Image (cartoon, rainbow, N blue to C red):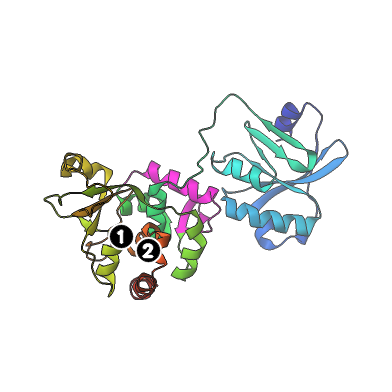
Amino acid sequence: MKKYLEQVMHQSVDERPFDAPEKLPLGCRNAFELNIVKLGQREFLLAEPIEDMNLTELRKSRIQLERYTGYPCAFYLKKVNWYAAPKMVEEGIPFVWENRQVYLPFLGMLLQESRKEPPKQCTVISFLTQKLLLKALYENWQDVMAAQAADLLGVSRMSITRCYDEIEALGLPFLKMQRRSRRFHAMADKKEMWEVMRPFLRDPIIRTFRLERKPDTEMILSGTSALAEYSMLGEDSCVTYAVRKDQIKALGLKEIRETPPDEEPACIVQEVGYILPFGENKAVDPLSLMLMLSDEELDDPRVESCVEEMLEELVW
């Protein structure tokens, strides 16, 4: 630790153990190796987690460590995912990422190794992560590791690891580090969990086909047609369906002529980023449906009332 800091900062570093651990709550006392580091005339607490911690845990620990020690706190981390590092910089959380990056804002310092190019930062939640969050809410996931989540969603463990990285980087409080692995814990109150994650979710619709005829195959309902399936809303004369990208070619959607904008189509087909099976799998799941409905549709008192009815009966 000392050697790395001296190497990147090009100055001598004094380091001594923090000598008053009794001041700390038991959780912090046992979770970190704590040292006081002196750079020039400035001292700060450098906390190295004994086991891997996620971003939510680091946030909470920093507040406690600074409160009880009186020192600015920085974390010494041997492993950080590339999504969490820029998030920590954005939030002003000081850290030293071994052989990669040093961020000490109380010293006006941000240094980064240039040997490895980080991947582009994720600015929009992926559809797979969104699907995972919704499935976890519906099924009340507790203590779900990446391997279990991969089985539940039918994808690779690596894909779920990336989803967990996104969730952590977004600061969503659903991952806990237990026995050196991240585990998903859904909130007990589904409505509260929805409110926490809603600002990060996006409309699953990628594009819309307004077709002169309905494809000769079964598709699941979407839009207000799905809402009619879940509630007492009357059915539209023009039914709306949802399909995934991989279904478009098989259904021959691009071979069916589209209706001019001023004419009513025989049906509407929405290409969506994911389909999450729900209930009898006749329609898109209720919360994805919420994300699909336009402001104009939600302004309709009948639609608004039926949405509330759907959520109370099927989700909350």
Q: Is residue 165 magenta?
A: yes
Quadrant in which residue 300 is drawn: bottom left
The image shows residue 36 at horizontal and vertical percentages of 79, 45
Does residue 293 appear left or right of residue 230 in this picture? Answer: right
Residue shown at the point (78%, 61%) measured from the top left: 23
Secondary structure at badge 1 equals: helix
Secondary structure at badge 2 equals: helix
Residue shown at the point (30%, 56%) measured from the top left: 276
The image shows residue 293 at horizontal and vertical percentages of 37, 60
Q: Which of the numbered marks, if any, corresponds to residue 223?
A: 1
Task: Give the class, few, some or many, for how many residues have Cα within 10 Å of label 2's Cα (few <14, many ≥20).
Answer: some
Q: Which of the numbered marks, if any, corresponds to residue 147?
A: none
Q: Amino acid at mark 2?
A: Glu
Q: Amino acid at mark 1?
A: Gly
Q: Is residue 51 above or below residue 302?
A: above
- For the residue pair 167 and 183, the one nearer the viewer reads as 167
Task: Give the class, few, some or many, for how many residues have Cα within 10 Å of label 1's Cα (few <14, many ≥20).
Answer: many
Magenta-highlighted residues: 155-184
- For the residue pair 271 and 303, the one nearer the viewer reads as 303
Of the numbered discs 2 and 1, the one sitting upstream in the chain is: 1
- For the residue pair 139 and 302, the one nearer the viewer reads as 302
Marks 1 and 2: in contact by CB < 8 Å?
yes
Residue shown at the point (43%, 52%) measured from the top left: 202
Pointer 2 residue: 297
The image shows residue 295 at horizontal and vertical percentages of 43, 61
